[in-house]
Amino acid sequence: MKIRHHFPRKLVIFIITTLSAVAINAALFWLCSKSKTSPDDLVKTPYDSTGYTQCQDDPAQPLYSGGLVVNPTFDQDLAGWSPFAGGAVEIRSQGKNKFLVATNRTATYQGPSQTLDNLKQGTKYTLSAWLQISGGSSAFVKATIKTGGQTYICGGSVVARSGCWSFMKGGFVPAQNSNSSTLYFEADSKVDIWIDSVALQPFTDEEWQTQQNAQVNSTRKRGIDVNVIDSNGRCISNVQLKIDQTKTSFPFGSAIAATILDNQAYQTWFVKRFNTAVFENELKWYFTEPQKGGVSYATAQKMLDFCKANSISVRGHNVFWDNPNFVQSWIKSLPVRDLQNTVNSRVQSLMDHFRGQFIGWDVNNEMLHFSFYEDRLGKNASIDFFKKVQELDPETPLYMNEYNVIETCYDSQSTVNLYIEKLAEIHAAGIILEGIGLESHFSDTVPNVAYMRSVLDQFGVLGLPIWLTEVDISNKVDNKNQAIYLQTVLKEGFAHPAVTGIMLWSAWHPSGCYQMCLTDNNFNNLATGDAVDAFLSEHQTTGVEGLTDEHGNFHFEGFLGDYKILMTYNTSYNSSATVASSFSIKSCTQKVTLQFSGIDCHDNTLQAVQIM
């Protein structure tokens, strides 16, 4: 079942004025209403964000009725389909449903295939299919596109099961035109590949951006009506309004390191841009207890104090890290019983010190890829970690955090359905505060935004908070191209309604950053820093000016966040009254009453305010 979040679409501000006292009382009311423009109204073929998270008895109908795919539901038997590089394909049926099976396979790449004509460079193709396997309990199935230029593109992947249908959703963006390409599905040669309801839908760059912009407008912005009336309820026209956003409510930030302490230039640069931070290494166990018994949170505490002093929220990264390469040697040498006692002490100590001070905990980092603690303490070690953290810090959301989920479809250990299955295990154990962390380390030459959007669609079905937690672009490309690709990723993430926060992995060090720096050592912007500034500027509402109309109304569209408003009224006696105030656009059914010049907002005054 899809879980949908309902957000307000319109904010109405009623401002009560008493000009003789040069005072203004204002009340803000949220009204939930539908966005004026739906993304579906703006493109020829609306983008379909449908996702499925469970293995099903029967496949659903293909998205876009199959789009470019010939015979997507195999009603015409094998028309348009053939085996790729050997093996055989045949049509089977269960009840009224017909599907294709690739059998007699002797190589991983042998599978069902279809020829694709005229793939266009830069076009975004969204790809989906329902898959099942026989001859084993499960198998990693990957969709591959072989272009005419003999390049191979991963279009999507899923761990398919025997006995039920798994939904694969992905996408790709060709780097060049291809007159004739081949879409084929591959898996371990020991299994038969079952496939049904295949779809491939193209979107031009203009259509893709139109969809992005419409989603931003409907998800991140609200229509705001300002209505100015006097204390008797009479509308006041020609009130001059100047409105600027002072703070965004969308969590956007970066990793920081201890290098920010006592570095005023770094601090100034960071605070100007970000409202959220995460410590690069300073909270990790190998940093806080490098030697047994030598626990110190001094550095992490100083960094937290800096963030608190500047109203910057902080993510807790991390309690444990399952990668043995980042486990201290003294921990590796512990007997099982001592290790269990030691991990319990780690959780207790960390929660005692930082309880309630972070906006989320990455409990056991990268546990889809690694299993140090599970190998030593048993298969439920991670779940036990989640239970203990939730018990000791019950108000803080708990996150999984993984790489190669949104970045690529080549990784068989971190497919969307494997991630969701692990979430389900955690939930079944009674963990109620879950969140989805997608690291977003893009190491491919160009980020695959079509695949990125499809992955977010799948996770969005769950209704859980989704964060892009460690966004960067590989330093295999120069900083100019890093900036271009970073902008692409930021726009795609911000536009998706399921994403609730974005963090960059760009902590500054004199010797350089992990992959992507935003400034030079004098804290002058690099191209990537300019990309961050452009992103912030594009998604902030500033410089709104206008006059209330004859009904005392003024309308504008604004991003969620905090605002300052300057209201000036010129009287008939050649004098004027000017009042500055502030308001916030945050959540539905919120009411904020503002007071000016020491005039109390009494009930009899508010009775003059009517919601229209």
Image: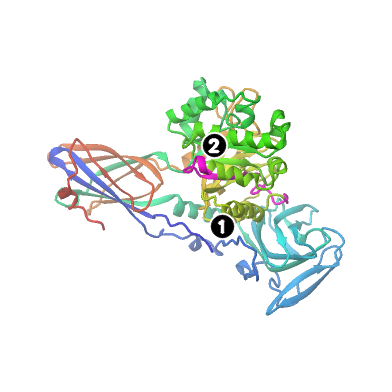
Q: Quadrant of the C terminus?
A: bottom left
Q: Is residue 391 magenta?
A: yes
- 162 on left or right of 551: right
Considering depth in this image, is 237 or 36 the residue closer to the camera? 36
Q: Is residue 566 magenta?
A: no
Q: Which residue, given by chain and number where applicable, does mark 1 sit on?
A: 207
- 335 on left or right of 254: right
Please name the amino acid that badge 1 sits on: Glu
Residue 515 x/y as whole percent: 66, 34
Q: Quadrant of the N terminus?
A: bottom right
Extreme-top residue of the structure: 262
Examine the image and state in which quarter residue 467 appears.
top right
Is 149 drawn above or below residue 328 in the view shown?
below
Q: Secondary structure at mark 1?
A: helix
Q: Secondary structure at mark 2?
A: strand
Residue 508 x/y as whole percent: 59, 27
Residue interval drawn in magenta: 390-412
Q: Does the rendering let one see residue 182? A: no
For the point 37% across and 53% down, which residue is it?
588
CA neighbours of label 1 inside 10 A, class few (<14), some (14 to 19), many (20+)? many
Closer to viewer: mark 1 or mark 2: 2
Considering depth in this image, is 328 or 310 the residue closer to the camera? 328
Please name the amino acid that badge 2 sits on: Gly
Residue 538 x/y as whole percent: 48, 43
Q: Which residue, given by chain and number where applicable, does mark 2 sit on?
A: 316
For the point 46% across and 34% down, which residue is it?
312
